[in-house]
Image (cartoon, coloured by chain):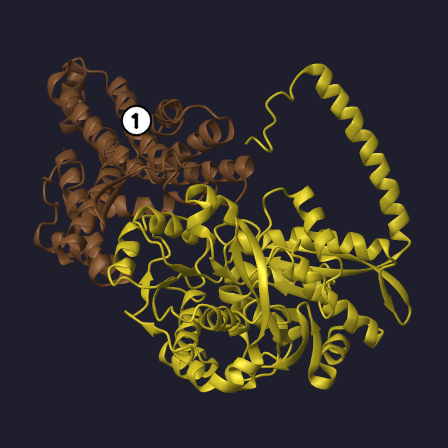
Chain colours: A brown, B yellow
Amino acid sequence: MMVELLAQTGLNAIYAASYISLIAVGLVLIFGVMGVINFAHGELYMAGAYAVVALYADLGFPFLVAIAAGLVFVGMLGLAMERALFRPLRDNPLGGLVASIGFLMVLQALAVMGFGVRMEHVPPVTQEVIVFSDKVRLAVPRLYVILAALVLLSALWLFLKKTRFGWALRASAQDPEAAALQGISITQTARIAMFIGAGLAGIAGALTAPLVSVNPHMGHSVIVTAFIVIIVGGVGSLEGAVVASVAYAFVHTFVTTFWDGVIADIVGLSLMLVVLIVRPTGLFGTADRA
Amino acid sequence: MFRKFGLSMFSRRRFLGDALAAMGAASASGLTTRVLASEKMIKIGFLAPLTGPVAAWGKPGLDGCQIWAEWINAAGGVKLADGNYTVEFVGYDNEYDPAKARTGATKLVREDGVKFIMMLGGDTWPGAQPVADKTGMLFSTLLPSDLGPDTGTLLAPAEVHPIYNVTGVEWLAENKPDLKTAVMCAQDDALGLPSVATYLAAFEAAGIEMQDAPLLFDPATTDFAPVVTKLLSTNPQIVCLDTCYSDYVHPIAEQLFQQGYEGQIISCTADFYDQMIEKTSVEFMEGFVFQFPDFDDPALNADGINFANPNKFFEEYNKRHPGEWGAVSWEYAAIMDLWKAAAEKAGSAEPDAVLAAMKEGGKGLHAFGEADWWGKDLFGIDNALVGNWPVVVIEGGKARIKGFKSIPEWYAKHGDLLKKHMAAYGQMWDQRA
């Protein structure tokens, strides 16, 4: 019985780690390259979910098409944010933060105007469940999220480590001025970072849309979790974001299952505080943004 | 989708056509306004969340009230001592924010001159209370936990949340006596906690054992798999979803389905249960017990139901707002029935006269039958209208009323249990104060 409970909780935690890491890595990438804390990141996640509502639930397109559209649509939103908000405020990180808060409200208002205030109904993609035992099960839509996170984060890692664009991004993140002197276009790297970062949030929202309550305010809860994760992992560290996502998801899920959801929140925040006290730069962070 | 962003609306011909039609409509409505201007009108304030996460318990109520007003006005309006008055609702979106509730209450009283203000209540009542104290305005709330000895002009005339939840448990114990164990989860907020205390009392009264302490979760929770895993870890016969918002009830039910649960579910609400069925199955949802009927239910046509044309109201509501019928769609309109009857009895729409007429004799006609003004024991004041409440069960994919149970009768037998659990959760009026 206890083994089954542990196994089911472990599966739950893997799922949570998957979608949290997609969101957190995107947030870190944007901060790392552009130096902007994007408060509208939760609303980009929301926009991805609404793309699925519009295309899959309302217009009847295949789920995969809706997900791909969600990624591209939210990526384009990211590009628009870069051009209209962050580029003019490149030398003013606080201004970028404030602008992102404003954009957050705009996106919420647009969602309310277009879809109403209520949660949207997204029909299940499939009701198939993988049954490991009577008490250990994994719904196939949750498996999709896990697999997508594995594939996308692996692809991002390869992109950053093995391609010239990836090197340019990392160089810009480490030292924008030196990167510019080497002929790297800061504007171009910012665009790429924004597209990828926003797209990751969008695809997280799109993939989880059938599993959560899609509403205009759904971004609030994930952005809080994402901030905890990137602070624990080290602001600006992609590896840190992934490791912290896994750690946070496991701690939160196990504490919820064995104690209480409210206590799990307290433990999650305490984890962040302990890391800040013991290692103010986070688990993988350095004194400089990297 | 694109309910407000019409995709094909921007051809020039269409635009011109629409513009002409709009001008015509504007002229017509101007004429209507002039005609109505000669009539006497009473304004009623609707101070509730119309946007934001709690809007589902505000906006559908205003939609229901608009139908109510149209029907009442068409039938001659409210008949007072000095003639007939039409009714108009003035909405104010408080976004479930106390500060905005205070601003809204002030605006409705001072600028709009309303005679009565309906609220969802809860977190927003403390914002509006100073306005009630200062002006003597009559307010209503859906949440009697707002009541206290110093809230003389606040009434809870539609629902005594969460006390009516005892009727569902009582029905379950009578009709499925083999079910003896339960677990429960709830969001940790002002709506969830008193409901937890109520369900605990109801289960104890029914001899149903709680297998674990109620599992509380943060209202910001989005993934309910860990919550459900914990609930199911003790193999309960009943899973109770307390008064969770729809945003939680749906994913929790879906998780129960995905994690293989096959037992009984009881919940305060099951708004949009057709969507839950689509996410699970008709078989899974069979026997789901909750407290809010569809108003096309034949049981609502019985004698003693004090809601005019419930089936027609349901039909009209769904015609105007397809798929949006929810727990509060009828409740504010039901409050207006009570208010209208009291105003006509008093011959006046003034708040103090209506309040006195409404509470005269200590009884009132609640939507679900004659009821008592009650609550001193629990809320410190007899300002909650309490009587029968329906128990609703999903059968073959459709919600049906299985019976009406008496809340006062339950309380007479088990009131001490309720007070015990309310006190344990700090939910008695003197603790809240």
Q: How many marks?
A: 1
Q: Can you tell which quarter of the image residue B89 is in?
A: bottom right
Q: Nearer the viewer, residue B374 or B387?
A: B387
Residue B30 visible in this rendered orientation of the protein: yes
Three-letter code, disc 1: Met
Residue B52: image x %, image y %? 50, 50
Could you tell me which residue is drawn at 32 percent across and 27 percent down? A199
Residue A35 visible in this rendered orientation of the protein: no
Q: Nearer the viewer, residue B352 or A118?
A: A118
Residue A6: image x %, image y %? 15, 53
Q: Is residue B395 above or below residue A263?
A: above
> Which residue carries the number 1 mark?
A194
Residue B140: image x %, image y %? 63, 69
**Which chain is mark 1 on?**
A
Residue B362: image x %, image y %? 69, 84
Quadrant into which the N terminus of chain B falls: top right
Q: Nearer the viewer, residue B409 or A83?
A: B409
Q: Give the side of residue B241 with respect to residue B399, left or right.
A: left
Could you tell me which residue is drawn at 44 percent across and 48 percent down? B283
Could you tell me which residue is drawn at 46 percent across and 41 percent down? B278
Could you tell me which residue is drawn at 45 percent across and 36 percent down? A107
- Circle 1 residues within 10 Å: few <14, some 14–19, many ≥20: many
Q: Secondary structure at mark 1?
A: helix
Quadrant into which the C terminus of chain B falls: bottom left
